[in-house]
Image: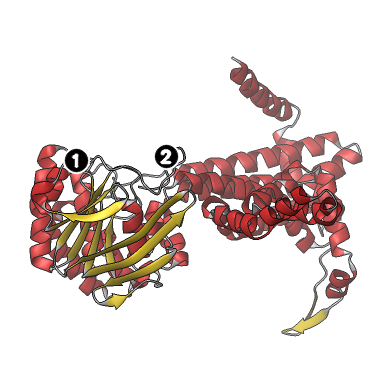
Amino acid sequence: MLGGFYIALIVAMVFAEAYYTSPSRMLAMFRNENIQFAIKLSFVTCGITTILCLWVGAPLAYILSRWDDTPFARRLDRIALDPMIGRMRCGWWWIPVLGLPWLLLRMVRRPRAMVDALVDVPLVLPPLVVGICLLILFETPWLRAMQRVHFTLFGEEYSLRITYGVPAVIIAQFAVSCAFAVRTLKVTFDQISPRNEQVALTLGCNRFQAFWRVLLPEARGGIVAAAAISWARSLGEFGPILVFAGATRLRTEVLSTSVFLHFSVGELGDALAVSLMMIIAAVAIMATMRALDAGPQLS
Amino acid sequence: MIRVSDLIIRSGDFSLENVSFEVPGGAHAALMGRTGSGKTSILETIAGLRSLASGRIELAGRDVTHLRPADRNIGYVPQDAALFSTMTVARQVGFALEVRGARQTAIDARVAELAALLGIGHLLARRPRGLSGGEAQRVSLGRALAHAPPVLLLDEPLSALDDQTRQEMFSLLRRVREKTGVTVLHVTHNAEEARALADIVLQIADGELRVVNRGELTPLGGSRAFIDPTRAGDAG
């Protein structure tokens, strides 16, 4: 019953949006040069971000799924933590000396859990904060110096400028979407028995081959789901893009920032038309990916 | 030939101390013991899938103690067959040769040879989904034998099969050994399997690994020495 209410809410939201937008308005928006640019930029950046998310997310999710850090924790206990505890039990005056090092070592005792928690940071941070963090990071002296570099390739001059450019759009999308990809892929890898990779190792594979030839094909469904969620998340990304890449017409304007630009100057109809385009694009991509994943399989 | 000398395996609260045994070339050895006694740990250590604290492992006259599983030249058949769900049976059986960069004609010929030996010719175009337990184990056996390893490690491959299929697998395993001359180390807790197949029976009981005659096989009642009974469970 409660689930049905939620589904009804989603459907009602979409219908309400569609009700206040006419096909003629949407066609007019399609013919608008700014919107055409925003659509093109959105599709290109979301595509690149999705590839990056899978490329980076798959190995990271694999490590989080398969890496057993128990031996590391035991070794650290034996070498450092247990002797430190022993010392502190001998006399309270050891506590100010060893207390802080003990606490720091205790924090890195389970590196897998630490990395696992770090992956969740972009998910729990407010999007605006992610954008501010990225902006500050790329304005540090080293990265600012890097962004001033110019070079010529095939007669064309290029620069490594990132902030307020298209690369910033991709980085902002990647910063959040990759966490979703890692979470989806980790769940997929967790569900596949490591026994298959072990057998592959005995058949002559190295670790990379076992991952590439055996695990990844078995994780196809999860990879498709991760790609779909990364793409959709990138399309909907707004806060970090606005802060880190800006929303300059015909330069860094993507569909989500386009909605904001129209909305902020009171063009509600245009904002709704662009929103509906985003909904249609997201639903189409998700449906296509699910259809691809549910393709016929020979048994 | 399999020679294990002074093997020590430690994993958390589980430990297995000073295990030594030898299986002559071409022989079939059954490794028996209760659940948690460490027989699967020994097998996985020989396969290179589990690290050892100390000791020495020789396979076919070669010291493989510190080699990667890929370089040990072994065949390994796990309990659940662990077939690759996305590959056809034919590709699966030829996988070890594919990884070694063999030509497709050589792979096809070897797959056909093994299919005839194991009676899986009619399954070659299928994927693992829908195979019976016996069929899956035959495919797993074929996959393990494709690169002609001198040593075959079997981890309770018959435990989930019905009696009739198990009897069929007995004769199949005998035929495989006769045709290939492979040395077999077979982990099992089933005395019938050991009697039917093994030339040598190694039994872990009371914390010791000892060789027993097939006629002496008794229901297993060995204690879990070296293992904290309250925390055992990560050893096979």
Does the residue at mark 2 contact the one at mark 1 (Cβ under 8 Å)? no
Q: Give the crowd class for mark 1: few <14, some 14-19, many >=20 residues within 10 Å.
A: some
In three-dimensional space, the C-alpha distance between marks 2 and 1, rounded to whole angstroms, equals 29 Å
Specify whether B50 is left or right of A264: left
Quadrant of image for the N terminus of chain A: top right
Residue B164 coordinates in the image, percent (x, y): 10, 39
Query: Residue at the spot x=56%, y=59% of the render?
Result: A59
Q: Give the crowd class for mark 2: few <14, some 14-19, many >=20 residues within 10 Å.
A: few
Specify whether B38 is left or right of A67: left
The vertical placement of A173 against B218, above or below, is below
As drawn, which residue projects farthest toward the front? A90
Specify whether B200 is left or right of A254: left
Count of labels in the image: 2
Q: Nearer the viewer, mark 2 or mark 1?
A: 2
Query: Residue at the spot x=84%, y=34% of the render?
Result: A268
Which labelled disc corresponds to residue B161?
1
User: Which of disc 1 and disc 2 is earlier in sequence?
Assistant: 1
Which labelled disc corresponds to residue B229?
2
Quadrant of image for the C terminus of chain A: top left
Q: Nearer the viewer, residue A36 or B86?
A: B86
Q: Nearer the viewer, residue B215 or A68?
A: B215
Which residue type carries mark 2?
Answer: Pro
Which labelled disc corresponds to residue B37?
none
Residue A219 coordinates in the image, percent (x, y): 46, 50
